[in-house]
Image (cartoon, helix red, strand yellow):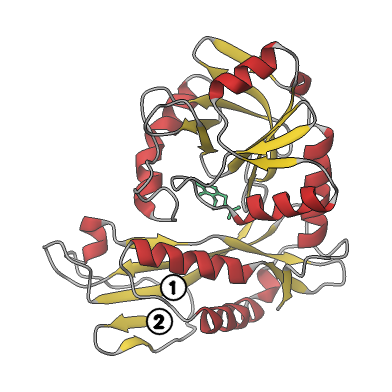
Amino acid sequence: MDYTEGKGWHDPRIVPYQKICLEPSSMVFHYGQTVFEGLKAYRTPDGEVQLFRPDANFRRLNHSNERLVIPPVDEDLALEALKKLVDIDRDWVPDAPGTSLYIRPFIIATEPFLGVHPAKNYLFMIILSPSGSYYKEGINPLKIMVEERYVRAVVGGTGEVKTGGNYASSLIGQINAEKEGYSQTLWLDGVEKRYIEEVGSMNIFFKIDGKVITPALTGSILPGITRDSMIKVLQSKNIPVEERRISIDEVVEAAQNGTLEEVFGTGTAAVISPVGELKYLDHRIIINDGKIGEVSQMLYDTLTGIQYGRIEDPFGWTVRV
Ligand code: PMP
């Protein structure tokens, strides 16, 4: 679908995957005016195909649009288009355990112009790709490392929306972690470098002394849809869950006094990823003997059960295609 100033969004269409033609001066290449989303279609045991909370993805897309000064899209139209697209490609939704059809909606500024202003033309596309398990370790616990030098986001910046620049600036943390034998970066806040924000492409949760804690959405963390869903699942099971600021010192202290019980990340690609080891300065913290914890396992089973239609969806999150 195209956007032209004065005309609005127009010409929604479904075409085969193909190359697109853009001017080298297209503004997205130079000024990074782009937003995206990520969600999945799942194969159910009866052979049907369903989406998980797609309305939340299009709501977040429009929130990202607002921050990047991209014109809003009609969320109902986007969902209708997505359902049609997935329906056409339903044979591409795999059915092996843990697999899915990854869906990537995105918008780029296409106006050819070498000066900074909000572009007058955009292209909104949705592409699909069958996907296996995201982490090579599978559901085995991840090793993550606190990035000490660089920050991912600051309040008032673009950290709480999904735009390419956030990921470009995070790459260096990813490389630093990998050099040390860790698979993901744990980012701290951009001002005091004390409060925990999130990991690469997932939100993070800590179980300390029976309570589950996740960093509050203070304006520099992506409001993950899986994060929100897991908070609701925990509440529905009467497991205490708190959204609040949590410092890295609190986590180190909990590890030292034996109350750090579980750590896990949440995300569309990451699903529920238990963390088995955390590195911060000279601290190497092994969590739950490097094994998946009870709450992480329960959340994994509940989330994937709902997503793949193996268990009832009491929250009304799934949308059949
Ligand atoms: N944080 C970041 C930076 C991400 O890229 C993602 C993946 N979209 C998440 C958190 C998790 O968000 P969600 O649960 O909506 O996939």
Check disc 1 and report the residue beneath it.
Answer: 125
Of 126 and 198, the residue lying toward us: 198
Q: Amino acid at mark 2?
A: Met
For residue 165, the mark is none
Image: 113 above or below 254: below
Q: Amino acid at mark 1?
A: Met
For image coordinates 77% across by 19% down, the residue present is 289
For residue 1, the mark is 2
Image-quadrant location for residue 49: bottom right
161 sits to left or right of 33? right
Image-quadrant location for residue 118: bottom left
Residue 166: horizontal and vertical position, in percent? 38, 47
Of 129 and 165, the residue lying toward us: 165
Residue 222: horizontal and vertical position, in percent? 50, 50
Marks 2/1 in contact by CB < 8 Å: the verdict is yes
313 sits to left or right of 320? right
Q: Secondary structure at mark 1?
A: strand
129 sits to left or right of 274? left
Q: Secondary structure at mark 2?
A: loop
Image: 96 above or below 239: below
